[in-house]
Image (spheres, rainbow, N blue to C red):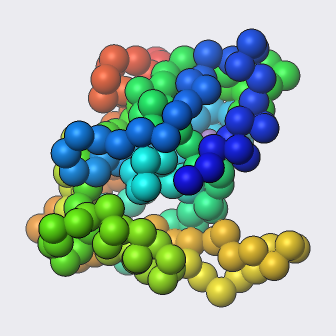
Amino acid sequence: MSLARYKKKRDFKETREPSGKVKRSKKGLIFVVQKHDASHLHYDFRLEMEGVLRSWAVPKGPSLDPSVKRLAMEVEDHPYDYKDFEGEIPEGNYGAGDVIVWDNGQYLPNPPTDDPDKEARRQYHKGHLSIVLLGKKLKGEFGLIRTNREDKNGARRQWLLIKADDKFATDEDVTEKTASVISRKKLSRDRK
Ligand code: MN
């Protein structure tokens, strides 16, 4: 796995984001969702795979309502240590703005398997991930499905994030929970 694109976009003398190495959880796989108040507010949805965090920018954030499809644009892989990153990316740098860890936990590809990393990779390459999230805010089964839309370079980066209909499905808006799950901090836009 390569973090070359991640590193190329950033100046680590300027930003406190982790420079990053390829690294794995000791047991199982983790996911993290960061809320990022950049030029456009978005949620970064990240899944551990092959020792990096595969990443998607979700402008409206995840939904627990199975009738809602949320656009998720695939972005560069992030280093494993990014899972704990909160704070300010300074003005003038890539992604400038504040970041909090909005949700995190383990995830499992569906169906259960002895080698979840391999199964997650297989589903990713197929363009159809079926995963169970064991987060604090996000729980239950989700689908992440690549669409056929190509960008101007012919790359298919557009995916849809959709809650599966299970006991965790609800039409309550989970994005109303605004605090970080590791520090309880909120973005300045969410402080009252
Ligand atoms: Mn971001």
Tally of numbered tags: 0
Which residue in the rendered view is the most extreme toward the left?
A: 167
Above or below residue 131? Residue 45 is above
- The answer to whether residue 105 is seen in the rendering is no
Whole-percent x and y of residue 89?
A: 67, 21
**Is residue 151 shown left or right of residue 181?**
right
Report which quarter residue 99 is drawn in. Answer: top right
From the viewer's side, name the closer residue of 168 and 81.
81
Q: Residue at 63% x, 44% y: name it.
A: 3
Above or below residue 136? Residue 179 is above
Report which quarter residue 98 is drawn in. Answer: top right
Question: In what quadrant does ligand 1 lie?
Answer: top right
Q: Residue at 34% x, 68% y: name it.
A: 118
**Is residue 182 shown left or right of residue 113?**
right
Whole-percent x and y of residue 84?
A: 41, 27
**Is residue 50 shown left or right of residue 109?**
right
Report which quarter residue 94 is drawn in. Answer: top right
- The answer to whether residue 118 is seen in the rendering is yes
Which residue in the rendered view is the most extreme toward the top?
A: 13
Q: Residue at 63% x, 62% y: name it.
A: 73
Whole-percent x and y of residue 129?
A: 39, 74
Q: Residue at 26% x, 55% y: name it.
A: 107
From the viewer's side, name the closer residue of 149 and 63.
149
Which residue in the rendered view is the most extreme toward the bottom?
A: 148
Whole-percent x and y of residue 8?
A: 78, 38
Above or below residue 49? Residue 25 is above
